[in-house]
Structures are given as structure tokens and as C-alpha cells.
Image (cartoon, helix red, strand yellow):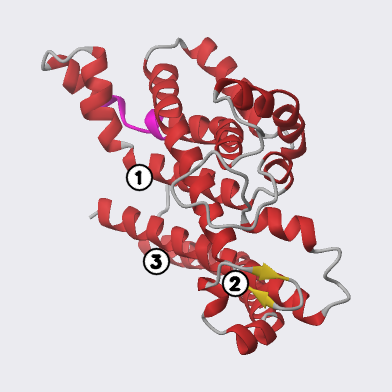
Amino acid sequence: MNFSFGNYLSSDCSAVRNWEPLGWVFAGMNFIFLTCTMGLATFLLVESIPVWRSEGLAFWLGENWWVGETFGALPMICGSFIVTGLAVLLVLPVALSGALFTSEYLTPPLRRRMKGIMEMLAGIPGIIYGLLGVSFLTAGVKDVFNLLDGNTLFTAGCLLAIMILPTVLTLSEDALRSVSSEFREAAEGLGLTKLQTAWRVVLPQSLPGIVGAVLLGIGRAMGETIAVMLVIGSLDRVPGFNIFVSGQTIPSKLGREAAEALGSAEHWSALMGLGFTLFLMVAFITICGNYFKYWSGR
């Protein structure tokens, strides 16, 4: 067989040259994504300039929202953080327990069936969850906590926890399964039980992936509109430490008033300011998640 290193090197270089157009396609796709992201941020910022000129930082710190008079976004910002925080606190124990059980204890056929169910639930539209929340969750919260109205921040947090549970669970299970079996074998060889192996070895190794799953769930929770709007009420007031009162989130406020604000430049600008605020909140969470992944991978 006739073989020379020069022929091998030339064939390898030609293969690289053949792949160059595909690399430019990928670069173009990334550029389009970056352009769309920056374009969205620029659009929201430009459209919200009138409210920044009239309100300044009082837009973020103001507690009153009176159309035509003053616009304060603090009730909606606090509502978004409270509802999202409640959802994460409620979903984390259930999602991590379910992911550990599915990953470490179920047989492969049962695991595939369970993941299929979770992925199907993750794809259900938010309006379906909202209708179920109106039908059952609001009445249940009202009866259990003896409230006058079941449309509260707590109800919205519970509903969001139900909505993001399949997403967080299935992605966390993927992160746990991505841990090499060598770690499990070494831990079991040292005498650790299956539970100790899962808790002390597998879980720390998969932590970056689990954080990514939680951040994806937070992104969906922060952006959910219709389902939250149906169960949270419509009270523009800073709730303080009481989660059993009606409130607003940024998406629910946008969903309620976007249609009626089209003819009012100032009202529309205030809603665009809310949209820009939500954009900054999600971007901040994403940056923190990327920093955590970089820090944990060092």
C-alpha cells in the first residue's frame, strides 16, 4: 500500500477547506441571533424613553400606577420576584427528589416512560394550566387558608411551580445521567450505598446542569403571562411580606393593559419600560448562571 504523510496532510487540509463554508453558516446564524437580541433590547429602550424622561428612576421605585398621572413599576417588580421565588422554592425539593429517583433507581424502560410523561407535560400550553388553576387552585387556596379571594401571589407561585416542574425535573435528570458511571462504581466500591452515592457523588458532579435547569425554569416562570394573569388578581400594590394578597407581575400587567395602551403614547411607553425591565432581569439571571457554570468548572 502506497502511503505518504504529504498526501495525508493535503487531504486533511482539503477537508478543512470543505468545512469552511459550513462554519460561515454557523457564524451567520450566531450573528443573526445576536442582532435579534440587541435589536429587541434597543426597541424596548427606545420605546420606553418618554417614561424615563418623565419619571426617571422613580419609574422603578414608584409604588403608584395611575394612567395619565404617574407610573411606578415597583409593585410589578416585587410581584415578579415574589411569585418566581415561591415557584422555585416549591419546585426544587420535588424536582430534585424526582430527578434523583428517576436517574438512580428506575430501570431504563421505566425511566424512558417517566421522561416521556414529563416532556409531554412540559409542552402543555400555559393557558391550560391557567384554566386548571382558575378551576381548582384558587378555590383550594381560598378554602385551605380561609381567604376572601383565592387570587393571590401564593396561588400564582403554586401554579408556576406546577408549570415549571416538568422542565426542571427532566433537565435535572439529564444532568444526573450525564455523570460518568465510573464515579458511581468507584463510590460503590468504597462502600457507599446507592443513596449516599447519589447524594454525595452524582449530585455535586451534575450541579452545573441542575443550575441550568433551574435557570430555564426561572426564565419560563418570569415570562409566563396568561396563566399568572388568571390567578394573581390585579392589585397594583407592593405586597410587603404578605403573599396571600392579590398582586401583579410584569407579564400579567403587560397582558392586561397592552391592548388599551396602543392609543396612548405615555401609557405605551410605560409598558415598554416594564418590558425593558423584564428583559434586564432575565439577562441578569442568565449572566449569573453563566458565571456560576464558569466558576464551578474551574
Tag nearer the camera, 3 or 2: 2
Q: Which residue is mark 3?
A: 6
* Element under disc 1: helix
218, 99: nearer the viewer:
218
137, 104: nearer the viewer:
137
Tell me which label, 3 or 1, sits earlier in the chain. 3
* Element under disc 2: helix
Residue type of the residue flagged with mark 1: Pro
* Residue stretch in magenta: 174-183
> Can residue 297 be seen in this snapshot?
no
> Can residue 85 be seen in this snapshot?
yes
Q: Residue at x 53, y 68 (%)?
A: 280
Q: Please identify the residue farthest to the bottom as the structure is shown.
A: 53
How packed mark 1 is, by other alpha carbons closer than 10 Å (few <14, some 14-19, many 20 or more), is many
- The quadrant in which residue 256 appears is bottom right
- Vertical side of 11 occupied by 233: above or below: above
Can you give x and y, in whole percent of width and height, for residue 106 in the image?
44, 11
Image quadrant where one finds the C terminus: bottom left
Residue type of the residue flagged with mark 2: Leu
How packed mark 2 is, by other alpha carbons closer than 10 Å (few <14, some 14-19, many 20 or more), is few
Measure the C-alpha gap from mark 3 to mark 2. Answer: 41 Å
Q: Which residue is mark 1?
A: 208
Tag nearer the camera, 3 or 1: 1
Tell me which label, 3 or 2, sits earlier in the chain. 3
Q: Which secondary structure type mostly characterizes the magenta part of the structure?
A: helix
Q: Which residue is mark 2?
A: 34
How many numbered circles are shown? 3
202, 265: nearer the viewer:
265
Residue 163 drawn in magenta: no
- The quadrant in which residue 54 appears is bottom right
Measure the C-alpha gap from mark 1 to mark 2. Answer: 24 Å
